[in-house]
Amino acid sequence: MSRGQIRQVAIACTASGGSPTVMEGVETESTPSITVGLPPLAANPVHPIETRSRQETLKLEQKVTGYFERWREPVYRYVVAAFGNSAQAEDVTQEAFLQLYRCLHAGQSIGNVRAWVFRVAHNLAVNQIKSQQFITLLDDETWEEIRRLYKDTSPTPEQMLIQQEKFDRLRVAIASLTALERQCLHLRTNGLRYREIAEILDLSATTVAETLYRVIDKLAKENYE
Amino acid sequence: MNNPHQRDMNREEQHPRRERLLLYVDGELAPKEATRIEAHLGACWSCRAHVSKIEKSIVDLMEFDGAMLTPRLSTPPNGWRGFDGALRQVVAESGRRSLLSIVLGSFGRFFSRARHLVIPRP
């Protein structure tokens, strides 16, 4: 994908931000609203690009570097876990933060930077990493290697065996999830709230709640039934 | 049935839908519904067992995530080495003014000054 195409994806992403979805009966007070879309220019006066000083540019660069250092790992983890390609995931993650710089430099106001970056990374991944499956991340060979390296803290060999069997079952259960289920699950494990996940995946919060329940139900069935 | 207290009691006795229990565990419910479910859980062992099952699944999942996925996902193949250079390039590109913006900017400043010369300030 060329840089121009990537820019189009990100612009399409920001333009389709829209208003936050609200789920009936879901707590709305504790979760901050997400401003992903472009704000009206009149309401948010910004420095024109021509007048941005070198000092301001440096400050913005440092700000974006700070965001990158803080959130690159969760974003990368999400992209690999949901789309299953670590090499492309690194590029996608970096490009999402470069897009962040471009948008902030252009004067765009972004209310929830973390959700914004996740959303841009998700859209880039959807376009670039099309046919990957989670199972490619944990194929049999990789799985055996991870199991070998895993330092078990179980006090007895029996407990260690039980723990490893549980992980084997979870691996199978997670590999059987649909793409949407994997995406919701890995956004949630990275600490995103339902309304943020809804914004990132362009879904209703109700769909996110139903999907996450389906995931938990599948994992519980695999583990306890 | 018109007695409000009786109505509340009945509502408390109804089992919430299973999906609502996950929302309850995740702190995603409005305070009113969260309080109602909490009261129901105080009385209903069946729903409490289901909440425990949900919580156990979350614990197992996060254990799996921490033990099996995190070691594999902590470092990307290139170790983020490309980012600083790419950002510097984007900064340079963004700072470079296009010829059109320079021309338009000059016109804008010229007309702004000309307007003040032609139209005296009040």
Image (spheres, coloured by chain):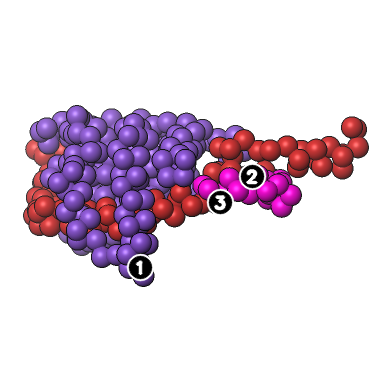
Chain colours: A purple, B red
The residue carrying mark 3 is: B52
Please tell me whether the stretch drawn in magenta is mainly helix, strand or loop. Answer: helix
Disc 1 sits on a residue from what chain? A
Q: Distance between the Cα atoms at labels 1 and 2?
A: 33 Å
User: Residue A61: x and y, percent?
Assistant: 20, 57
User: Residue A53: x and y, percent?
Assistant: 20, 57
- Looking at the image, which residue is at 15% across and 31% down? A5
- Looking at the image, which residue is at 58% across and 45% down? B50
Does residue B41 show up?
Answer: yes
Classify B2 as above or below A63.
above
- Looking at the image, which residue is at 46% across and 49% down? B57
* Few, some or many residues within 10 Å of mark 2 (<14, 14–19, 20+): some
Q: Which residues are magenta?
A: B35-54
Disc 2 sits on a residue from what chain? B
Disc 3 + disc 2, Cβ < 8 Å: no
Classify A161 as above or below A78.
below
**Three-letter amino acid code of the residue under disc 1:** Thr
**Three-letter amino acid code of the residue under disc 2:** Cys
Marker disc for residue B47: 2
Tags 3 and 2 both on a single chain: yes
Decide if residue A130 is on the left or right side of residue A46.
left
Marker disc for residue A156: 1
Q: Quadrant of residue A8?
A: top left
Classify A93 as above or below A63.
above
Q: Residue furthest front?
A: A158
Tags 1 and 3 both on a single chain: no
Q: Regarding mark 3 in the picture, which secondary structure is present there?
A: helix
Quadrant into which the C terminus of chain B falls = top left
Disc 1 + disc 2, Cβ < 8 Å: no
